[in-house]
Amino acid sequence: MAAAMRRARSLVIASRCLLPSTAASDHRLLSTAPHRLYALPAPSDSIASKPVSLGLAGALSFSLTLMTRAEAKEPPAPDLLPKDVVLYQYEACPFCNKVKAFLDYHDIPYKVVEVNPFGKKEIKWSEYKKVPILVVDGEQLVDSSAIVDNLSRMIHPDNTNANEEETKWRRWVDDHLVHVLSPNIYRNPSEALESFDYIASHGNFSFTQRLTAKYAGAAVMYLVSKKLKKKHNITDERAALYEAAETWTKALNGRDFLGGSKPNLADLAVFGVLRPIRYLRSGKDMVDNTSIGDWYQRMETVVGESSRIKD
């Protein structure tokens, strides 16, 4: 019994890192979901009268749209590209996903070490006992926002101007958005179990730990989520999530991205922390009930495939 309780406590810490106030870290819950392309409008009766010409025009427009998004990616110059990048993470943690969004968007190859939240033996070598930890050419970087700042300076050494709007919304992600996520993914027993089913399947667990993570973890975090609601003055979880999504969409002010024609660090931060929930029930509800879906699809397309180096 005592051993089970210790495992449950370790899981609470891990799951908090998992999503803003949860405990795992910035795992990417749904980064493996297939990237979706925009569908062309269904032909109406009037369009059917000129199927060939409009069909070609539509195909050309669609191709140009995809090309524009592809060109928005920003791989660093070869001489600025880090030689060896290793990310120590929890697969579903939003903060780790924030770092991965930056690496993927800039096509920076990286290796991943999945940390076991029960013992954290994978990071015993470090005095810093949280994730993400990013080791870049032998140098340890910690704290997701600080990691992104360091990487950005590394690959864009001439870009020293701070953008007030970008800084404001990056701070909003860390101070507000992440705290809305945990109460939503652990909102009720079934959603908590859905979240931990993913965590247990993709995390670094033994068979016994996987069972503990899925069932004990879901039960514990369902209860913890109620405390998180009170701590962050959240009355209705879904309403708070929808409000945050609409707040971000309004900030875009008609632009494709906050950065204009291409994502900036705030776009990547919002996209990164939302990745773990996008295809969970809470994320699906968010897209169905707010106007954030179009922006999210654009981000999925422009960030593209993961630049992670497979083992």
Image (tube, rainbow, N blue to C red):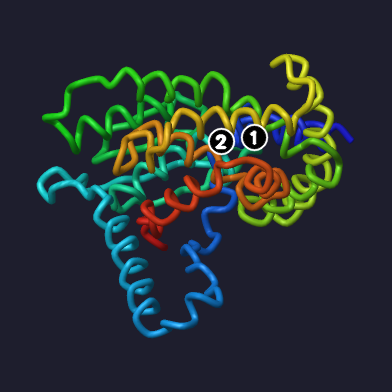
Crowding near the residue tagged with mark 1, few <14, some 14–19, many ≥20 C-alpha atoms within 10 Å: many
Residue 50, visible in the rendered structure: yes
In contact (CB < 8 Å): disc 1 and disc 2: yes
Q: Residue at the location (73% across, 56% down)?
A: 207
Determine whether, in the image, residue 161 is placed left or right of residue 285.
left
Crowding near the residue tagged with mark 2, few <14, some 14–19, many ≥20 C-alpha atoms within 10 Å: many
Q: Which mark is residue 14?
A: 1
The image shows a total of numbered marks equal to 2
Determine whether, in the image, residue 96 is placed left or right of residue 13.
left
Residue 209, visible in the rendered structure: no
Determine whether, in the image, residue 158 is placed left or right of residue 230.
left
Instruction: State the CA–CA distance, disc 1 to disc 2.
Output: 7 Å
Q: Residue 120, how many percent across, how many down?
A: 56, 37
Q: Residue furthest right?
A: 1
Q: Residue at the location (50% across, 30% down)?
A: 250
Q: Is residue 20 above or below residue 292?
A: above
Q: Which mark is residue 223?
A: none
Q: Is residue 293 above or below residue 60?
A: above
